Structures are given as C-alpha cells and as structure tokens.
Amino acid sequence: MRLKTTLRKLKHEKKAAVVVFITFLFVSLGVNFTLAGVGSVTKAVSDFTRIGNVEFIVQGVNVENLTRFGEVVNYLYFNEGRVEFNGKEYTALIGYGRFDVPKVQSSPEGVYVLAFPEAKRGDKIQINGKTYTVLGSYYYLMGEPIVLTREKGSSLYVFMRCNDTEALSNFLMKHAKVVYFTVYRKGQAPYMDTMRSVENFAMSFFYLLLGASLLIIVLISLTHVRGNTREVGILKALGLPDSFVSFLFIGDYLFIALLAYLIGIPLGIWLGYAYMNSHFMPLKPNYTYPLGWDVLIVLIIALILSLPYVYVSRLKPIEALRFTPKKSSSLRFFLVFFMVFLASSSAYFGIRGIENYLNFNYPFNLWAWGSPSKITGLPGEKAGYLSGQEVNGITTEIYFLNYTSSFEKTLIAGRWFKKPDEAVIEFGVAKKLGLKVGDTVRVRLLGEVRTYRVAGISYMNFYDGRAIFLPKVSFVPDEEVFLKVSNPEEWKERLTAQGLKAITVEDLKRQTENNLKLFKTAVYSVMVVIFLISLFALFALVYLDIEGSEKVYATLKAIGIPNSHVWRGLLKKAVPSLVTGSLLALPISLKLGEYIGDMVVPAKLGPSDIVKVLPPLTGFYALYAVFLVVITNRVFNRLDVIKALRS
C-alpha cells in the first residue's frame, strides 16, 4: 500500500522527482568513482605488501650481494628503452630477470611482459629493431611496463622480503648508487597518505552536496507536514500508524533518493576503476571498499529523510485538529539560502585556495631527468632524487642539492643549508607539520631515520609542496638537472633525442591547468546541482506557502488583488533571507574551503577572496528574485478559487 501511495504521488510530482533523482545519482557517481579509484590502489598495495617489504632500484651491486639480507622475490637487470607495439611507442624497463610473483623469467623463446595490459599473449613487439613474440602478459604494480629479455641492463630492480632494512640501507649507501628505495612497513606503502588526502578532497565536495540536499529535502518535508497538520491529526485519529502518515509526506523523496543512489553505485565503481586503469597503471577492481561506504551513506540517507516521523509521532491528534496555520516564516528561506551558499561557496573556495597557492616563479625553465651517465655531461644545476621517503611520518620526496644552489632564491624564511645535518623544506611540509626555521625533522632515508635541522622554508611546489631539500650524498647519483636556457623548447627536443625525459616550465603550467580543469569540472558540477536543488526548494516553499493558506490567497484572487501583491510579499521575506544567509555563509565557507584545499596542497585564502565573490552575488540575488516572481505567478495563477474556498 505504501509503495502504491508513493508511486501515485510521483505521478503528480514529476519535476521534483527528476531534480531529486539527478542530485542523488550525481552524488552516487561521484562518491563511487572516487572510492573505486582509491580502493583499486589500496587493494593493489595490500596484495603487493604481502609478497615483500622492500623495493628498490640500484646500480653497482648484484642479486648475489643481497641474499644475506633476506629473500629476493623479484629482480630485473634492466635499461630503460622504447618498445613499439601496434604502431605506438612505450617507455619500458627492458632486461633480464626472474619474478617469483608472478612466476615468470627471461626465456630464449620470446619475451614476457608485466604491467603492460595492451600487449597480450601471442602479440608481436619490437625492441631496437628486433621483433619478439609475447609469451605471456601479467599484472604487476608498476608505473612503467616491464619486458623480460635475455639481455642484462646496468640497473637492478629488486623486490624482496628483507630481514633487516637498516642493514640493507647501510650496505647500499656504501656500495651502490640508489635510484629508488621504498620500505613497506606493516603493509603501509609510501604515498598512501597522499591517496587518502586526495580521496578526502574529492569526497568533501560530494559530502557538501549530499548534506545540502538532505537538509533541504527534510526542511521541505517538515514544512509540508506542518502545512497539513490538521490532515495529519485526522489520519492519526482514524488510527493510521505514524510510520504510514510520515511516509505520505516523505516516501516519494526517500524512494527516489535511494533508487538514484543505488543505480549510481555500479556505474560509479566501473567509471572509477576504468579511469585509474587507463590514466595511471593497470589495477584490479576492488568492489568491497566502496560498497562499505555505500551501505553507510544509504543508511544516513534513510535516517535523515525519516526525520519527519519524529514530528508526526510527537504530534497529538487533538493538538493537530486545533492547529491554526501561521503566517509563513522567513526562517525557512534563510535556512535554504544559508545551506546552499555554504555548500557551493565551500566548494568554490576549496579550488580557489589551490589556485592561490600555485607559483611558477622557478629558478629554471627546463627540467630534465634520466640516466646519471647522461645527466653528468649537461650544464645546469644537477640534483639527486629519491621518492617515497618520509619526514615526520608523512610521505615526501627528497632532492639532493649543493650547498650553493639557485633554489636559494625560492626561500621565504631562513637560509639555505650549510651543514650536512641541515635541510630546507617546502612550505607545504611546514604548514602540514607546523614547522618553522630552527625546528628539527626526522627523515626516513632508505629505511634509516636521520635528524635534520630546518634551515629554511621554500615556496617551491615539488610534490604538491611537500618535498624537502637535503645536501648531496654519495649514494644517490645525480639523475635530474635544472637549466635556465634561452630556448627551452629546442633544448627539450635535444635532450629527448638523447634518451632523457624533459619538461619546460610552460609544460608544467599546462599540465597544472589541465589538472585544475578536472577539479574545476567536479566543483562546478557540484555547484550547478546545488543550484538546481535550491530552485527546487524555492518552488516547493512557495507552493507550500500558498497551499497552506490557500483560502486566504483564493479570497485575494477572487476580489481581484493582482499577482504583484502576492510576490511582493514573498520577496519581502525571501530577499532579506537570501542576502543574510549568503553573507553569513561566506566567512564559514572560506574556512571550510581552506580546510578542503589543505587536503591536497597548502591552500591560501584570505578576506580578499570573499571580496572577489561579492559582485557575482548580486547577479545571483537578481536571478533568485526573478525566479521567485515567476514561480509565484505560476502557482497563484493555477490556484482554483472555488475549490480552495470549498475545502
């Protein structure tokens, strides 16, 4: 019976149903897209850390030198090169190796490929002009494809179960050149804290939308119930249960919201998995991770949309039958506008804080990296580099520079390091950890913890502002170079032809702008849906206001009072609420937006950012005022005078 009642109501509320459906479908797609991507990475790392606990790339040592520190699970003697497949070229790690997981090793009959989903068994690939048959293609957690051939390279990739990571790191510091070194401690991999931050950043926008939507729908439902208090009293006096009475007013919204969210779950999970698989690295889907959150969100939706039941259950039939409708309050308009501007402004300030942080005033205009032997002969400032390290428990990337460096120009506090135990940190590290010049930091370098004094703070934004600069060490070769040249594009082509990877500052700007476009698309989509929800809320409030006092409005219409008298009265309540609600929401949303932006970079926001949004607000004020006039005229014109006066 309840389902029939809900479906009957939906036939008369098609537009409202469409708005609610689109809103919750959008929320579901966004939430599950984000969770599916993060869940795929989490599952991949979790599976990977069960196999071993140390992964590194070095030069100057052999596998035989490493067995004393534990069991070598996978190894590869490789050189970085080009692989041609189906007319496209791919950069890959090519060389001789043996992998216990998956069970493959170099074979004279052909090649095995890992982390190369494009190539399948039986396909043909070309390496240095030679054609090879793919004997097998396997999944592997690696950003670049791996091709197992019979030729040994100069670099050694190792993944192992290490018994003593500190002893291993000390050995590598003395006898090897370390290109990459990562320790998976207790199943926790580097960059997972960054992944969590990105997850929280993306989810925050959908939480804003979800929260605003639910609160507005609850407000409308309560207004609807209060406007029909006498009807509620009659139904309760007839003995109908409170749950059924409540369902009459909220059942359609609850049904549509849950239906839309459930439809969006599989589609969002598939889109998130496909995006991560095509843009980052081959991954396996993880369905359990998003579904756990989905169960919680569905319960929250059902719980919040059931709040009118509390009002109905506490309402006594006698009080309800004696109820006299009161003049509509401005408070409900204020609450709608406050929620709408709080959610949309927080989303806007979140992305604005990231834009304010970005700074491309670098001491170089060309950045290249690659084989240390090729980097050595180039002009410019050379640097060693290690990713996946830790500073005070958060993931960082380390650049090893000279005691005299052009990066000294980027300091905003302190000085450049002058001693081996001093460091320069980026602004994001300082803000994240609450550090200042003179403080000490604990850096986990190749698994070994070292203490450094903060000599200075830089505005550079390597690794989203969370990198650190240390004095050069002998065991990390120079594999990066920063150049200041007059023709960076020509230099870029020249270095690329030499087998190096190069990027100009203009390229960095374009990449950053493209990444921002993705964020902005999500933010503006959230803001558009919130705007649609606000229009739906205003229409519902005006409709309920006129319906709740339909005899009064029918009398006005019968005696010839013009429509302008009605919408002017509503504007007197709505416009002050609109202005007050939006202005009160701005300072709160500024802080909330800064908190959201800080999840990914050290966001910068101030009072000037509020001033910048004030002129566009006047346009929204006018738009909402016109919409109120239009919908008031529409509802008032459709009012049946005879039917209203007889009711």
Image: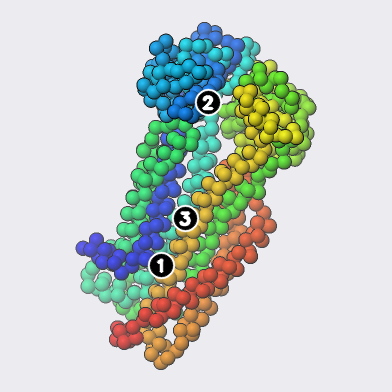
Identify which residue, 343 or 638, lies in the foreground.
638
First in sequence, mark 1 or 2: give its number. Answer: 2
Q: Which residue is mark 2?
A: 91
Drawn side of residue 237 relative to residue 30, left or right = left
Q: Which residue is mark 1?
A: 220
* Visible residue check, residue 263: yes
Between the residue at mark 1 and the residue at mark 3, the CA separation in whole angstroms equals 16 Å
Q: Amino acid at mark 3?
A: Leu
Look at discs 1 and 3 and give the one toward the viewer: 3
Identify which residue, 287 or 481, lies in the foreground.
481
Q: Amino acid at mark 2?
A: Thr
First in sequence, mark 3 or 2: give its number. Answer: 2
Instruction: Sort mark 1 into few (<14), some (14-19) or many (20+) by Cα contacts within 10 Å.
Output: many
Indicate the position of residue 277 as horizontal and vertical percent values. Answer: 44, 35
Q: Which residue is mark 3?
A: 209
Report the residue at 51% width, 27% height from top.
90
Task: Please identify the quarter of the rendering in which residue 12 is found.
Answer: bottom left
Task: Please identify the quarter of the rendering in which residue 469 is found.
Answer: top right
Task: Please identify the quarter of the rendering in which residue 644 is found.
Answer: bottom left
Indicate the position of residue 461 as horizontal and vertical percent values. Answer: 65, 38
Report the residue at 29% width, 67% height from top.
11
* Visible residue check, residue 580: no
Report the residue at 30% width, 84% height from top.
643
Identify which residue, 559 or 511, lies in the foreground.
511
Q: Quadrant of the N terminus?
A: bottom left
Q: Amino acid at mark 1?
A: Ile
Indicate the position of residue 314 as horizontal and vertical percent values. Answer: 34, 67
